Amino acid sequence: MSSGRSVEERLLKRAVPRPVADHQPAPQQIGDGLWALERRLLHFGRILLPSRTTLARLSGGSFVVIGPPPIDRVTIDAINSIGSVRYVVVPNSFHYVFAADFVRHYSSAQLLAAPGLVERVPGLDATELGGTPPDAWSGAIEYAVLGPVRGVSEVAFFHRPSRSLILTDLAFNMVHYPRRLDRFVWRASGIPGGFGPGRTSRSLLLRDRDVARRCLSRVLEWPVERIIVAHGEVVEEDALGRFRKAFSRYL
């Protein structure tokens, strides 16, 4: 890793999370052809972080798994109960930890990754998302790429049938916490009290304002009615208005 990359990025790379085994709720349908798989991860040994994987159905009936979760028998059965996995997507530069194990089980699925990730993570056998989505995504999923900025990127997805914007670490919406300790630690680390970018998002993903503006402006062209984040509550009310307000300084 080059010396130009930030302290935040180096810390994130070392903070390998562990799944909480006793929190494995079934997938919940949250829109037309869209499911959320909720899990909890332990960071730094004891700090809980809610994590959401999104499963988006394509027009042919198969699924795209955005943000692969830790793999286990319960998760496999839950996903298989919905349908067949055709694509697995690592949506940004940091949510790759469980990808290799996940695709070892779903070996017929194609692994796609945010631009720059394959270079950052040697040995990750993935195809980087290019300028246009795969043909099989037509009419179902579009995306906009933010970055890479100094090797870091995120892909924002729009699932057209459910009119849902799917984000990973670009924005959080962590309103409720299991414990006071978790709230204290994540607030201190720069995660906001409502919908919006955290400190790490601002210092890494949004570092180049011109690059950020191009991606964020593309998002505002979509008829978004819901925002799904990897960490926190789903935004169901005034989704585009809240997105515009949260990122106003970059637009």
Image (cartoon, rainbow, N blue to C red):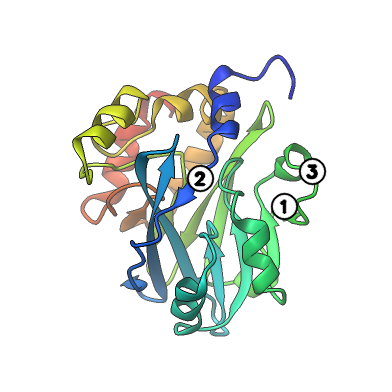
Q: Residue 139 lies in what quarter of the image?
A: bottom right
Q: Position of residue 216 (x, y in %)?
A: 47, 39
Which callout, 3 or 2, points at the residue further toward the start of the chain? 3
Q: Residue 137 lies in what quarter of the image?
A: bottom right
Which callout, 1 or 3, points at the residue further toward the start of the chain? 3
Which of labels 1 and 3 is toward the front? 3
The residue nearer to you, when weighing 141 against 57, is 57
Q: For mark 2, what is the residue?
A: 218
Q: Amino acid at mark 1?
A: Gly
**Mark seen at residue 130:** 1
Q: Secondary structure at mark 1?
A: loop
The residue nearer to you, when weighing 32 against 27, is 27
Which of labels 3 and 2 is toward the front? 3
Name above or below for residue 249 compared with residue 88. Answer: above
Name above or below for residue 100 compared with residue 197. Answer: below
Q: Residues within 10 Å of mark 3 (few under 14, many from 20)?
A: few
Q: Residues within 10 Å of mark 1 (few under 14, many from 20)?
A: few
Q: Secondary structure at mark 3?
A: loop
Which of labels 1 and 2 is toward the front? 1
Q: Could you tell me which residue is drawn at 25 percent across and 28 percent down?
A: 184
Q: Marks 3 and 2, Cα distance to the nearest angstrom?
A: 31 Å
Q: For mark 3, what is the residue?
A: 122
Q: Position of residue 219 (x, y in %)?
A: 46, 47
Q: Amino acid at mark 2?
A: Arg
Q: Amino acid at mark 3?
A: Pro
